[in-house]
Amino acid sequence: MTVQALYDFSPLVQLMLLGLLLAGIPLAWVAYRHRRSTPLRRRQALTLLTLFLTFDLVLFGAFTRLTDSGLGCPDWPGCYGSASPLGAKAEITAAQSAMPTGPVTHGKAWIEMIHRYLASSVGVLILVLAALTWLDKRRRMVGVVQPVLSPWWATATLVWVCIQGAFGALTVTMKLFPAIVTLHLMGGLFLLVLLCIQAVKYAQMEGRLQAVPISFGLRGLLWSSCVLLVMQIVLGGWVSTNYAVLACTDFPKCQGSWWPHMNFQQGFEVWRQLGLTGAGDPIVFSSLTAIHYTHRLAAFLVLVVFVALAWQLNRVPGLRTQSRLIALLITLQLVTGLSNVVLGWPLLAAVLHTGGAGALLIVVAWVMTVSTSSARVSTPQAHVAPVSGLAT
């Protein structure tokens, strides 16, 4: 049997051209729809569309992981050295025949490659955004009078998407190493935050979205909520990548106990292969229980803090929309989290749970970007522009 190399760059040019072709569709749509808009408006529209497609990519990444398609193609960036599963039909058929329920099947190969195609198109869009912002800066330097967003935002986003691509490659070549898969998930969510910040800043620069003054205490609650949310998402990623969701199948107890037997040392040993300890021994079930139950206990704290945050934001005239979105998303997370446990980890609920976490992080980033300390803004709250300035 021929051993497939983990890295085979022969289809790289074809994949790049395909990513460029796919990215051309949203680029053409933005150019046509906003052909009479200001440059700032076009930049914000492209940023928002890239944010939307990146969110879709995160959802499809969750779908790829949850359908066990992460190794649908055992090499990177192509599939058995081809740009699509069509060119690897013989190799995939052989692998599927040898192991019908294994990691490599025709369906899983297509899921994995579609994820890579979407990722490449998002990368092209972010590259275009970076190029446009540097072009805007150059035009301003030669005398064109128009406000521009610092190109370093888009440049940082471009660097980050390249790092994210590297983690995607390592996810495959390191055979779903839990720490790498979790970092890949967090990288995708951080990409959403970067794009959201830029979209808000564009709206502020165009004057359609003004800063919303909030108290020092509320800003502290906002930062605390953000830190807790990131920690909870990391825990959730660790649960998912270790397949620990079904370690507890009852609620509110776990395995019929309020404090089941748990092995925290093995469960939270970060640098190890999937299903193994750092020493190479199989991890015990109590390790998965520790991972699951820690995430569940932390969820109660996150729920209380975000209910308080939504309540406080609802008292600020310029942030009531975000307050309602947070309340809605927290409810979604509660429902989908419970569904994962009591319904046996259904695919739809699991994907929505990841999407809800990403959406919640976007809303928190939106609030943090648009709000400022009341001592730094003289504009009364009664005259704050509506938050609809983010809409395309």
Image (tube, rainbow, N blue to C red):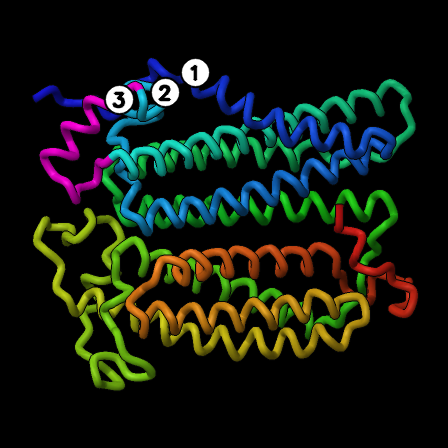
**Circle 3 sits on which residue?**
88
Q: Amino acid at mark 3?
A: Ala
Q: Amino acid at mark 1?
A: Gln
Q: In the rendered structure, which disc, 2 or 3, sits on the residue that comes first in sequence?
A: 2
**Circle 1 sits on which residue?**
14
What's the distance in space between the residues labelled 1 and 2, CA to CA? 6 Å
Q: Residue at x 48, y 19 (%)?
A: 16
Residue 83 numbered tag? 2
Nearer to the camera, 195 or 106: 106
- Find residue 37 and report its image quarter: top right
Magenta part, dominant SS: helix
Other-residue count near label 3 (Cα within 10 Å), few / some / many at <14 / 14–19 / ≥20 = some
Other-residue count near label 2 (Cα within 10 Å), few / some / many at <14 / 14–19 / ≥20 = many
Q: In the rendered structure, which disc, 1 or 2, sits on the residue that comes first in sequence?
A: 1
x, y percent for residue 328: 59, 70
What's the distance in space between the residues labelled 2 and 3, CA to CA? 9 Å
x, y percent for residue 39: 82, 31
The N terminus: image quadrant? top left
| Left or right of 164, for residue 154 | right
Where is 140 relative to 205, above or below?
above
Q: Amino acid at mark 2?
A: Ala
Q: In the rendered structure, which disc, 3 or 1, sits on the residue that comes first in sequence?
A: 1
Tag 3's secondary structure?
Answer: helix
What's the distance in space between the residues labelled 3 and 1, CA to CA? 15 Å
Tag 1's secondary structure?
Answer: helix
- Find residue 82 and report its image quarter: top left
Query: Is there a contact, CB below 8 Å, between mark 1 and mark 2?
Result: yes
x, y percent for residue 181: 33, 46
Highlighted magenta segment, given as a residue range: 87-105
Query: Is there a contact, CB below 8 Å, between mark 3 and mark 1?
Result: no
Where is 377 relative to 215, above or below?
above
